[in-house]
Amino acid sequence: MADFHFLRPLWLLLILAIPLMPLLYRKARQSDSGWSRVIPEPMLRPLISRFGQSGSRTRSPVLAAAAALLILSIALAGPAWRQAPTPLQQQNDSLVIVLDLSLSMLSTDVEPDRLTLAKRKIRDILRQREGSLTALVVYAADAHAVSPLTDDRKTITGMLGILDPVIMPAAGNRADLGIARGLELLKQGAPGKGRMLLITDNVRDDYQDQITQQLQGSRFSLNALVVGTAEGGPIPLPKRGFIRDNGDIVITKASPSALQHLAQSNGGRSHQLTIDDTDISNLGLLAEDAEDWQESERDLTVDRWKDDGYWLLWLALPLILIGWRRGALAVALLAILPLTPRPALALEWSELWAREDQRAPEMIAADPESAARRLEDPQWRGSAQYRAGNYDAAVNSFASDDSPRAHYNRGNALARSGKLEEAIRAYDQALEAQPDMEDARFNRDIVKQMLEQQQQKNDSGEGNDSDQQNDEQQDQQQQQDSDGGSGEQSQDNQQGDQSGDQQQNSEQRQQGEQSGNQDQEPSSPQDQQQQRSGQADGSNETAEQSRQAPAELSEEPLTQGQEQWLRRIPDDPGGLLKRKFLQQYQQRDTQPDEGDTPW
């Protein structure tokens, strides 16, 4: 019980009302509720209580009511002493944090220095935005993405400790390049409104104009978080003293007014960095759809304290019945009626609380044949039929809709049923309606190869071999199907969600090329582009080679010699990130700005 605490302790204030209950009860008994104005006193006295007396003796309900109030207050306070895994909230909100990593962030005008406070604030923001999509970009003379948009805050938190100006390939203060890099991340497919947060001490006027031009016409806003003071401070370097310019110690000053003007010009707000969460609240950095719970694409969970106060309601119910005797029978009937036998209805409990499109993925995964009989939406029914292996029926179900997704799924079902030419026409219809549907384009190319090889085999007289090869290539096409059916959505949800089949088959597509991403689906257009490039590299392979999975990892413990070799590898994540930034800087060939300063 060392972890016992209350989730909502303010509800315990209801206990203060218990001493007042006897006084309120006595006052209620002495009052005649105004009946004396309409009923004569001799007739009223036997009916109601006055001056603490009544026509018949009654037991006071104060004790039972006080006990019920005590139990209810504890239950509402949320007693908790254990944690349970809870699906992580996937919010439709994107934030790119652009962090100044120039030498000026080492200034000590705030304790311990500007950069340390900025990294602490980033940790606070990530904790407040748990489950939301957040990215991190750093800049000096050039800008680099530390992490793309991700809902796993540990990815960014683990990199904060190694962020230091010394890992940047060149000194400078190019805030315009940092905003440009953050804008690229948002344009790559950020869901929701999308916004950026600039954490710095100052931005030059000419860079402000360039930033405003970059954000002009976009749907993304810019907020600013000011680090440092207007009085400024020196910049210390380890074992080198303070940075000097022509013999004078450089004093870098923060400019809250300049950052406020920049933020207001781009649809955002500016605030001075605070120790508490005041700046986070005023800038509105919490997820805008904090009440919109969605299933995380990577099935992430988080341990949350479990509210066990509802068990106390069973103790409070008998006490409430005692204190309210006249209504006790009605309450007892309401409690007993749900337990009485009821006629069988073709309605499940889950159908009362979830729509069909919310229940369909789970139903299809559990029993596709049963789901095919029960689902009414033709697209979801086609998904279940596809999963059950009834491809002809799935083709008919998908044909009821003229959307690109329906044509794509119909092409998958036709390909699995061996109707390759019709499948190609279905993929063409999907691409005609949505030219950027890369999954349809990839599957169409695979089916075309299957059809050409089948025709070549038929022309050479090797009919039996072609049948076998066709079956193998259909297995390959099954691995390439990014959605055999359960990725279909209802009319309201068709464009936003992806199904379990799409995730599963996307993982299968990656197994031959990207062994490091076997357990998750690409979450950004960059990942999808890498995935497709890996697929293109192996398109000339045979179907049997495409099906080969990477070798399984050995679970045997390492030998003593292997462990010694591993210990020789230096643990230097900062050096790895430094080399990555240097390579990007050299590839881009970023030219220095004449007006920029080294700090």
Image: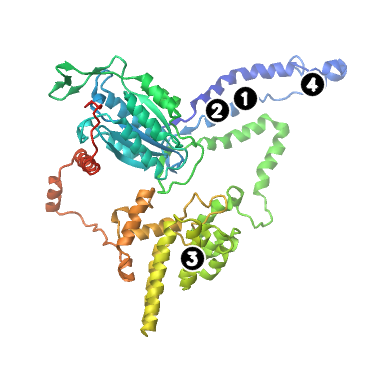
Residue 443, disc: none
Mark 1 and mark 3: Cα distance apart in space:
72 Å
**Residue annotated with mark 4:** 48
> Which tag is nearer the camera, tag 3 or tag 2?
3
> Which tag is nearer the camera, tag 2 or tag 1?
2
Residue 63, disc: 1
Which amino acid does the dot numbered 2 rest on? Ser
Q: Position of residue 304 (x, y in %)?
A: 43, 38
Q: Position of residue 173 (x, y in %)?
A: 27, 29
Which amino acid does the dot numbered 1 rest on? Leu
Question: Residue at image x 32%, y 38%?
Answer: 156
Q: Which quadrant of the structure image shows residue 33?
A: top right
Assign the N terminus to one quadrant of the image. Answer: top left
Assign the C terminus to one quadrant of the image. Answer: top left
Q: Are marks 2 and 1 in contact (CB under 8 Å)?
A: no
User: Seen in the image, is 279 located left or right of residue 403?
Assistant: left
Residue 73, disc: 2
Mark 2 and mark 4: Cα distance apart in space:
32 Å
Mark 3 and mark 2: Cα distance apart in space:
60 Å
User: Seen in the image, is 478 located left or right of residue 327?
Assistant: left
> Taking the image as drawn, is residue 485 in sight?
no
Q: Mark 2 vs mark 1: which is more N-terminal?
A: 1
